[in-house]
Amino acid sequence: MTGFLLAGVQMRPTFGDVRANLAASSLWIREAAARGAKLVVLPEAASAGYVFTDRAEAAQHAEPVPDGPTSAGWAALAAELKIWIVGGVTERYGDRIYNSAVVLGPGGHLGTYRKAHLWNDEKRIYDRNTAGFPVFDTPLGRIGVGICYDAWFPETFRSAALQGADLVVLPSNWVPVPGQPGDGPAMAHLMCMTGAHSNQYYVAGISRIGVERGQEFVGRSVLVGPDGWPLAGPASRDREELVTAEVDLIGTRRERRDNPFNQPLADRRTDLYSS
């Protein structure tokens, strides 16, 4: 059996308080594991919050990976609970500052993804990913990672698909989109659903809630199947909660990729595309 329970933690980080955020996220991780989850995804910037005034303030709250308190704390939980964890941290690497997501398993740190597409004030706060879009091979399946605004770029999803990803996880801090109808799907949901359908894999978009320094975050985390339809969620706009769904990354590979009607990878016309 290759199926397992995938869980997303929709939470409200406390700005600037790494210790409190580690404690709060650890409780949610334990709750997810108690329900049977084998992979737990946390929001973007879950270690210290998001709305930094400038680069210097971000640096004050940044931590090294994997030896910083958040990564080390989550890694200890992954080892104890025998699960995999992906979560957003503000990373310090030498004199560089990244908006990152760590990938951790029972054996420790598998790797780090650094946000490629920087949004709004992020451009003056963070350094930019120059290493591409890694896909991590785990016993659960092949896991790609993006962060929030990365989902607005189809290249994020396709880069992972071309490396054989079975799932792309998106730690996120989704914000209101001007003009978005209140009774319809969030714009981020459409991005997740399109990325999943166009690449025939699962997508987990896990966002935060609350208001931080005047910036509202809309929650509404969602887990999407490889057909593009939500498996769980969207979650609420204003409550901390778990979003869970049974998935089978390995067992569905043939079914996902041998669809006689739609084969978005096999049917690509690379002879017609320009970069």
Image: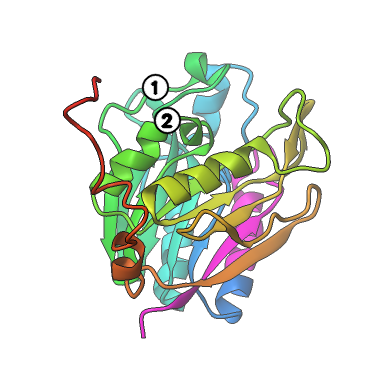
Residue at coordinates 50% horizontally, 13% vertically from top-left?
124
The quadrant the N terminus occupies is bottom left
Q: Position of residue 142 (x, y in %)?
A: 30, 60
Taking the view exactly as shown, the residue that stands out farthest to the bottom is 1
In this view of the protein, which residue sits in the foreground, 209 or 246? 246
Asked if residue 104 is among those painted magenta in the image, a careful observer would answer: no
Q: Is residue 87 left or right of residue 32?
A: left
| Up-down relation of residue 28 to residue 160 (above or below) | below
Residue range corresponding to the magenta coloring? 1-29
Q: Position of residue 140 (x, y in %)?
A: 35, 70
Q: Earlier in the sequence, mark 1 or mark 2?
A: 2
Which residue lies under the disc numbered 1? 127
Badge 1 density bin: few <14, some 14–19, many ≥20, Cα 10 Å: some
Q: Label 1's element?
A: loop
Q: Position of residue 7 (x, y in %)?
A: 56, 66
Residue at coordinates 75% horizontally, 23% vertically from top-left?
178
Asked if residue 12 is among those painted magenta in the image, a careful observer would answer: yes
Q: Amino acid at mark 1?
A: Asp
Q: Is residue 94 visible?
A: yes
Q: Position of residue 20 (x, y in %)?
A: 66, 51
CB contact under 8 Å: marks 1 and 2:
yes
- Between marks 1 and 2, how big is the CA–CA gap? 5 Å
Q: Amino acid at mark 2?
A: Tyr
Residue at coordinates 46% horizontally, 50% vertically from top-left?
197
| Up-down relation of residue 77 to residue 195 (above or below) | below
- Disc ID at residue 98: 2
| Up-down relation of residue 258 to residue 67 (above or below) | below
In this view of the protein, which residue sits in the foreground, 169 or 93? 169
